[in-house]
Image: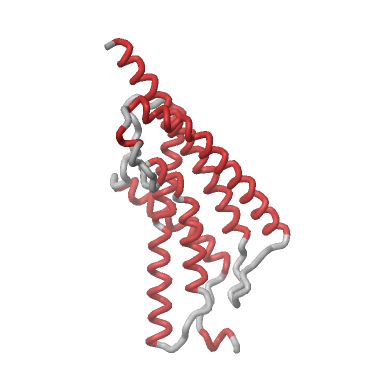
Amino acid sequence: MSLESIGFVLPHSVYWGVLTLVPATLLAVAWKQGIVPAVPYEPDAGPIEKTLDWISDRTGLFVALWSVMAVCAYTYEVTARYLFNMPTIWVHESSFLLFGMQYMMAGAYGLLHGSHVRVDVIYTKLSLRRQAAVSVFTSVFFFIFILAMMGTAYGFFFDSLAMDERSVETWQVQYWPVKMLMLVGACLIMLAGISRLIKDIRIYEKQLRSEVSA
């Protein structure tokens, strides 16, 4: 079956270029118009914490805008398939890869904004100081998990890059950028976790001083 029989095929360079340039352009326009949401800094946050929170928040906004491209791609697919009888070979694959990368890259944003699911039946019954103490203690397991994720993603990325791994579908898109973003996403979660640890230590110390002075 020739490519002409199934319509336009998105070039790989255009796909990766759009994922990079479109969100950056939309964020630049939104910033110029003054409609970019403010980063939720803690009132007494230090410069390191503010920097880490800025990175987590802005990368989350960046990848959130990928959903706009997915909507456009599926609109094209539906139009081409049902109006012109020319289904694509790339829309579905491009979109599920996009959402997979988005899932990895948005982890830091979710941690910053408290969007992750947590079992807090006992946690919510504790005082703020004890909550902070529990969070500091359990952060050990968090960092062990993230370090393991970073190590695994590192191996995935460089193995994929070395063999120029591509999808088995007809589109044959490169997989190494996807696995690179697995590593980047893990690093972003690590940075967000460091910021969270700084917050918990500060809360613990603040509450402890308050209890001692009382």
Q: Nearer the viewer, residue 137 or 89?
A: 137
Q: In the drawing, does residue 134 fall left or right of residue 181?
A: left
Quadrant (top left, top right, bottom left, bottom right) of the N terminus = bottom right
Q: In the drawing, does residue 21 fall left or right of residue 79?
A: right
Residue sitting at the far left: 214
Q: Which residue occupies 61% across, 51% down?
A: 153
User: x%, y% of residue 85?
Assistant: 44, 89
Q: Which residue occupies 42% across, 38% down?
A: 54
Q: Which residue occupies 34% across, 30% down?
A: 42
Is 105 above or below relative to 92? Answer: above
Q: In the drawing, does residue 152 fall left or right of residue 40?
A: right
User: x%, y% of residue 48?
Assistant: 46, 28
Rendering colour mode? secondary structure
Is 17 above or below relative to 108? Answer: below
When asked about the image quadrant of residue 125, the answer is top left
When asked about the image quadrant of residue 175, the answer is bottom right
Q: How many marks?
A: 0
Q: In the drawing, does residue 152 fall left or right of residue 32?
A: right
Residue sitting at the far front: 122
Residue sitting at the far right: 162
Quadrant (top left, top right, bottom left, bottom right) of the C terminus = top left
Is 167 above or below relative to 156? Answer: below
Q: Which residue occupies 43% across, 30% down?
A: 49
User: x%, y% of residue 32?
Assistant: 33, 46
User: x%, y% of residue 172?
Assistant: 62, 72
